[in-house]
Amino acid sequence: MMRAMATDLPIRFDGVTIASRTVTLLDRVTLQIEAGAPTVFIGPNGSGKTTLLRTAMGLLVPTRGRITCGGVEKSPPIHRAFVFQRPAMLRRTVAGNLRYALRAARIAPAGREKRIEELLALVGLDGFEKRPARRLSGGEQQRLALARALARDPVVLFLDEPTASLDPASTKAIEDVIRAIAASGVKIVMSTHDLGEARRLAGEIILLHRGRIIERAAATEFLNSPKTEEARRFVAGELLV
Amino acid sequence: MHENASALQLIRAGDPALFATVRLSLIVSLSALAISAALGIPFGASIALTHFRGRESVIVLLNALMGLPPVVVGLAVYLLLSRSGLLGTLGILFTPAAMVIAQTILVTPILAALARQTIEDLWAEYSDELTAMNVGPLSRVTTLIWDGRFSLVVALLAGFGRAAAEVGAIIIVGGNINGFTRTMTTTIALETSKGDLALALGLGAVLIAIVIVINGLAWLARRVGERIAG
């Protein structure tokens, strides 16, 4: 796979707060995301995982604080891509969705069809080119969303709970693709509330709770010897509320 | 058209005057629809995608304009195009061009209001994806219009229905001149007033048949499109 220059890393949050009048979604978050193994944000619903990913992507503007990507503030999402928990399928065929993403990423028309073939092969959707994207199953749509995100040839790929509400077979297919993408050098930054998924995919784990970072550690360290009370309870399967 | 002949007899006889009337009706209505689509759909889309002071008022006004009374529009266009009017020098009063202008004014708000709602609903679904793909404003509009095309076809049909059935505005600005600005609806109004109900009813049946055929073709195109693109 052709790789873009790694211009968007590291992603740095300096005291980032996202708040409305009544709710604080992220509370003075400071962290740096570097190249390397997948970074997985875990935490209960409403802990701020999705908000953090969307902010890093540039979809939300911090109420306070500063975000830089590769040292640049307000960097356009040229080398970053996002797969949403419920991806919207454009009203086109599978190939049409990828063609659209390639055009948006300003990939030259001459190389598009070959790239579509490569992307579909990568996510296991070969032969689906002419299928209407909106008629695919949930797992197939998620794989197409992955391929569409990869059409941007991203340096960083954000995945917001990519296997939520999928069956085990679809979950395995998605996780296999994520591992292949990570192995190709793309930085994976994802969220999940499924500890098993974090165990299978993460290089490092960051626990979020009530908009704050509670603990950050290498995956094995986090899972085997969590240091905070909240992390111990989360790893033990207790409910964090 | 011959006196005391029904429209069906005239159709069977291949009456040139009848076919000229039908042709003019279609030319005026479809021209007004095409101009309204070119103006109204992008306008509705831009309202859907932008936020500005007074936006809600614009939407309420746009929705209200869907109910514009045709005779009032006809009167306004008449005053505008009459010899002493602002556009009187154009000399197009009592021509098909004046009829197209009047119908365009009636149809544009319908297309703009329905397009605004369609595009706004689609934008709620697409906004994250298109923003994440770094898609620019103009490309967003064209994407949403294209992806909303099946719903917009319904808006076009509503607009065509309004134009094809319209009589109040075009009779004022067209003058119902035989062989020049006489359409199916103005002929029906005239023949009814003369008491030739057979011809009026026959023409009414022809008009309804045309509307049904056009709706049928649009439905077919939509079904084929949906089968291909979902």
Image (cartoon, grey):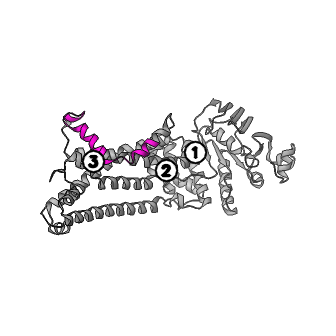
Q: Nearer the viewer, residue A155 or A159?
A: A159
User: Mark 2: few, some, or many residues within 10 Å (few <14, many ≥20)?
Assistant: many
Q: What's the residue type where badge 3 is placed?
A: Ala
Residue wearing tag 2: A99
Foreground residue among B90 and B60 = B60
Q: Which residue is mark 3?
A: B169
Q: Is residue A15 positioned above or below B93 on the image? A: above
Asked if residue B146 shows in the view, the reply is yes
Q: Which residue is mark 1?
A: B128
Q: CA distance from mark 2 to mark 3?
A: 46 Å
Closer to us: mark 2 or mark 3? 3
Chain of the residue that carries numbered disc 2 in the rendered image? A
Q: Are marks 2 and 1 in contact (CB under 8 Å)?
A: no
Establish if B215 lies above or below A78. below
Is residue A191 on the magenta stretch? no
Q: CA distance from mark 1 to mark 3?
A: 44 Å
Task: Point out the residue furthest to the left here.
Answer: B2
- Residue B57 lies, in percent from the top left, at 47, 39
Residue under the image location 24 percent in, 41 percent down = B78
Neighbor class of circle 3 (other Cα within 10 Å; few <14, some 14-19, many 20+) is many
| Tag 2: amino acid | Arg
Residue B65 part of the magenta segment: yes
- In screen coordinates, is A35 left or right of B28? right
